[in-house]
Amino acid sequence: MAPIKPEYQVIEEFNDLATQVVQKYPD
């Protein structure tokens, strides 16, 4: 199993995904 990631790293990855979605589907 992969090691547990520090919380800040998970948040950073989530923010990166959210940014990609916003760029793909702008309001």
Image (cartoon, rainbow, N blue to C red):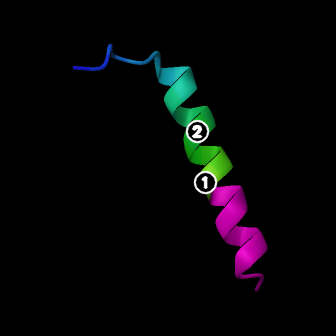
Q: Residue furthest left?
A: 1
Label 2: state its secondary structure: helix
State the CA–CA distance, disc 1 to disc 2.
6 Å
Q: Which residue, given by chain and number where applicable, does mark 2 sit on?
A: 13
Name the spot of residue 2 as percent of width and height, x first: 30, 20
Q: Which of 15/2 is in front?
A: 2
Label 1: state its secondary structure: helix
Q: Which of 1/23 is in front?
A: 1
Q: Is residue 13 left or right of residue 22?
A: left
Amino acid, disc 2: Glu
Quadrant position of residue 22: bottom right
Residue plotted at (76% across, 86% down): 27
Name the spot of residue 17 as percent of width and height, x first: 61, 54
Q: Which mark is residue 4?
A: none
Q: Residue furthest bottom?
A: 27
Amino acid, disc 1: Leu
Which residues, given as a range, are shown in magenta?
18-27
Residue plotted at (55% across, 35% down): 11
Q: Which of 2/11 is in front?
A: 2
The majority secondary structure of the magenta stretch comes to helix
Crowding around mark 1 (Cα neighbors within 10 Å: few <14, some 14 to 19, many 20+) is few
Residue plotted at (64% across, 46% down): 15
Q: Which residue, given by chain and number where applicable, does mark 1 sit on?
A: 17
> Pointer 1 and pointer 2: residues touching (CB < 8 Å)?
yes
| Up-down relation of residue 20 to residue 23 (above or below) | above
Q: Is residue 17 magenta?
A: no
| Up-down relation of residue 10 to residue 22 (above or below) | above
Name the spot of residue 5 as percent of width and height, x first: 42, 18
Q: Is residue 1 left or right of residue 3?
A: left
Q: Quadrant location of the N terminus?
A: top left
Crowding around mark 2 (Cα neighbors within 10 Å: few <14, some 14 to 19, many 20+) is few
